[in-house]
């Protein structure tokens, strides 16, 4: 089996055209190693893109847009000084992933490309209206993360497509964000609910809400009905009850995981409680 380890973006672009069709593309490899151990695959080649500096950067440009390389580890996101305000939700989601060892290897690109329904970084990126940057046949293009993931472990990525990173549009400075995860245990827990919220408030009253929830269906989704219900109100227990009832109705109408409807009120209460310290 051949292996490739490009050291620059240009080298990667040049290399892409000559790769065998079944080449496996890795950045952190934490999910792939587990899956590969279960299968006796004879792969023609492995492409590791984790050595490319451009794909490991976290940058905010002059327009306030956030750029995250696909090979940024969860640990790098968790510890970044740039991820505050509206972008804090990304750092909190990254901090919730697995163990310290996993966070030191697992990357945001792999988390999204694997498209697990419980992927922790999907809900924050969807709530933030983030776009993914994709390299296909030597051409780079952008696609909303909400369109990139099409279902459970399904994306629009073709063989040899390479996920380069993500762009998040600018948010007002007063925007606040949090990620709430409900799992079965404190450590190394797979998400049963992943709630990403970005709120803009004046004197405690919500003026704008961006909410996405993961692990209640095949992919993380925006929840516009919850967003509308929260605007004009305080992020308090009363609002949590309203949002919880709406979420429970959504789960009952769309999900096979009916038991999650019973937890919806508590989940929304806990998620909104994270904003109480900023009131």
Image (cartoon, rainbow, N blue to C red):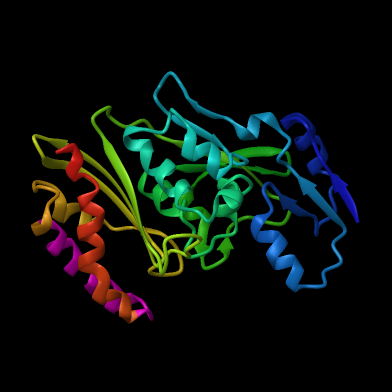
Q: Is residue 241 magenta?
A: yes
- Quarter the N terminus occupies: bottom right
At horizontal 23% and vertical 46% (from top left) the residue drawn is 209
Depth check: give the residue in front, 234 or 221.
234
Left or right, 32 with respect to 274, comes to right
Please name the residue shown 21% across and 44% down the image: 275
Task: State the image coordinates of residue 164 (x, y, percent, origin top left).
Answer: 62, 40
For residue 225, say whether it is visible.
Answer: no
Task: Tell me: residue 124, above or below residue 76.
Answer: below
- Closer-to-camera residue (123/273): 273
233 above or below 202? Answer: below
- Where is the C terminus found, in terms of image quarters? top left
The image quadrant of residue 57 is top right
Q: Residue at x 46, y 47 (%)?
A: 95
The quadrant where residue 266 appears: bottom left
Q: Is residue 88 left or right of residue 205?
A: right
* Chain part drawn in magenta: 239-257
Q: How many marks?
A: 0
Instruction: From the image, give the main secondary structure of the stretch colored magenta.
Output: helix
User: Based on the displayed image, in which of its 4 quarters is residue 220 positioned?
Assistant: bottom left
Residue 233 higher or lower than 54, as above or below: below
Q: Is residue 42 magenta?
A: no
Task: Tell me: residue 182, above or below residue 79.
Answer: below
Q: Position of residue 191 (x, y in %)?
A: 43, 64
Which one is in front, 94 or 223? 94
């Amino acid at each position: 089996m051949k292996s490739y380890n490009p050291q620059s973006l240009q080298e990667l672009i040049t290399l892409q055209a000559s790769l065998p069709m079944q080449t496996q593309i890795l950045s952190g490899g934490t999910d792939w190693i587990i899956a590969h151990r279960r299968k006796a695959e004879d792969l023609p080649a492995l492409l590791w893109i984790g050595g490319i500096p451009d794909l490991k950067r976290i940058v905010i440009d002059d327009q306030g847009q956030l750029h995250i390389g696909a090979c940024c580890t969860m640990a790098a996101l968790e510890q970044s000084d740039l991820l505050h305000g509206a972008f804090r939700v990304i750092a909190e989601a990254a901090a919730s992933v697995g163990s310290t060892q996993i966070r030191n290897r697992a990357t945001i690109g792999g988390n999204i490309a694997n498209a697990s329904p419980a992927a922790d970084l999907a809900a924050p990126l969807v709530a933030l209206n983030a776009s993914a940057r994709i390299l296909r046949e030597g051409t780079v293009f952008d696609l909303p993360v909400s369109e990139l993931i099409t279902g459970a472990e399904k994306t629009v990525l073709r063989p040899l497509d390479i996920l380069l990173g993500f762009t998040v549009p600018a948010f007002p400075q007063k925007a606040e964000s949090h990620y709430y995860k409900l799992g079965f245990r404190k450590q190394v827990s797979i998400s049963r609910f992943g709630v990403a919220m970005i709120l803009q408030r004046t004197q405690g009253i919500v003026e704008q809400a961006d909410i996405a929830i993961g692990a209640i269906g095949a992919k993380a989704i925006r929840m516009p009905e919850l967003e509308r219900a929260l605007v004009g109100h305080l992020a308090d227990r009363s609002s949590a009850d309203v949002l919880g009832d709406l979420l429970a109705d959504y789960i009952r109408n769309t999900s096979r995981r009916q038991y999650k409807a019973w937890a919806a009120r508590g989940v929304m209460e806990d998620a909104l409680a994270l904003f109480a310290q900023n009131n």
